[in-house]
Amino acid sequence: MYDLIIIGGGPAAVSAGIYASRKKLKTLLINRNWGGQMSYASLIENYPGFDSILGMDLSNKFVSHLKKNTLDIKEDLDIKEIKIEKKGKTIKVRSEKGDFKAKVVIIATGRVPKKLNISNEEKFIGKGISYCATCDAPLFRDKEVVVVGGSNAGLEIALELSTYVSKIYILVRGPKLKANEYLQEKIKKISKIKVIINALVKEFKGDKFIEGLIYQDKISNKMKEIDVQGIFVAIGSSANFSLVKNVVKLNRQGEIKIDSKNRTSQPNIFAAGDVTDISHKQIVIAAGEGAKAALNAYDYIKKIKIRKEIL
């Protein structure tokens, strides 16, 4: 039996693990992979202490720091179910390699990239369609690619790809880019990047691998084609709530509802980071929320122990 189980591998989970260890809680951290969306970022320029740092490098620093603390860690592990037992006093976490029990759980599962939900999208995932430039950009060296999405994420992906590929088309569904001005200024200086607005992706082309796409010009309603060898989708993300959808309350966006102490609707389940309904999704905020969740979980566990001693 653990005092605390933390589920996740991003900044919120790592921060929670460090603080839980410092509070001497018997802690288990379970994740499928490290870093969360932080590891997908090309260049991070707004995390205190670093003028600029690669997302993967910052992720590695987080994990290295975590592993200097005393806690159990289960990596590359899929969780099947979270179940409340003993009238709410114990939480069982079922995994592919056995069950684990704890007094308290912190959910820090972050977010997952949204898909376009076009009929043949699944067919080409890993065969020309990618959601992570940091992971896959080198595979498209000297090729032509499309980036779908005109927000910060889309432009950051385009900037990272620009050091590898020969041509980049940024397809924007709306009438203009939504990214921060400084990112827009950066892409204007790169001649190999072309922005196409009012473009609605309708179909992917190819046999075994991506060969291009068809989009609708929303002004003329005409269908147009672009021949490319790679497509990077950057249209946002959604909360990774599947483990707790029937356990705690969610908002309309599928985010876990928490109070100021990171408590969910289930008293001994806390949540932190981008999976929750906090107002902004940033690495520095997620790290702070993870620390706060661990400290509040510690206070909750301490009260349980005091109550038992009185009884």
Image (cartoon, rainbow, N blue to C red):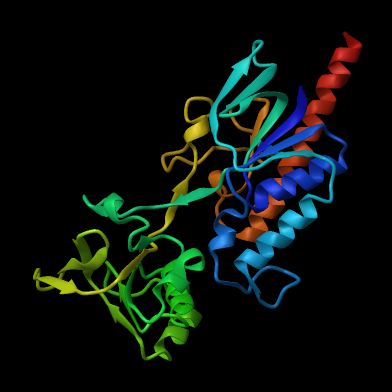
The reply, left or right, for residue 232 in relation to residue 76 is left
Task: Give the farthest residue toward the front.
Answer: 208
In x, y percent, where is residue 57? 67, 67
Instruction: Name the residue nearer the viewer: 137 or 187.
Output: 137
Instruction: Name the residue nearer the viewer: 24 or 69.
Output: 69
Asked if residue 173 is positioned above or below residue 99 in the image, the reply reads below
Which quarter shows the N terminus? top right
Which quarter shows the C terminus? top right
In x, y percent, where is residue 167? 33, 83
Instruction: Tell me if I can see residue 22 in this picture.
Output: yes
Residue at point 68% right, 26% down?
A: 268
Asked if residue 14 is positioned above or below residue 27 in the image, the reply reads below
Image quarter of residue 79? top right
Image quarter of residue 196? bottom left
Instruction: Tell me if I can see residue 277 in this picture.
Output: no
In x, y percent, where is residue 86? 66, 11
Task: Give the farthest residue toward the right.
Answer: 309
Image quarter of residue 223? bottom left
Residue at point 41% right, 69% down?
A: 154
What is the tally of numbered marks visible in this picture?
0
Asked if residue 26 is positioned above or below residue 158 in the image, the reply reads above
Residue at point 40% right, 88% down?
A: 188
In x, y percent, where is residue 259? 63, 38
Task: Give the farthest residue toward the top.
Answer: 311
Residue at point 62% right, 55% down?
A: 35
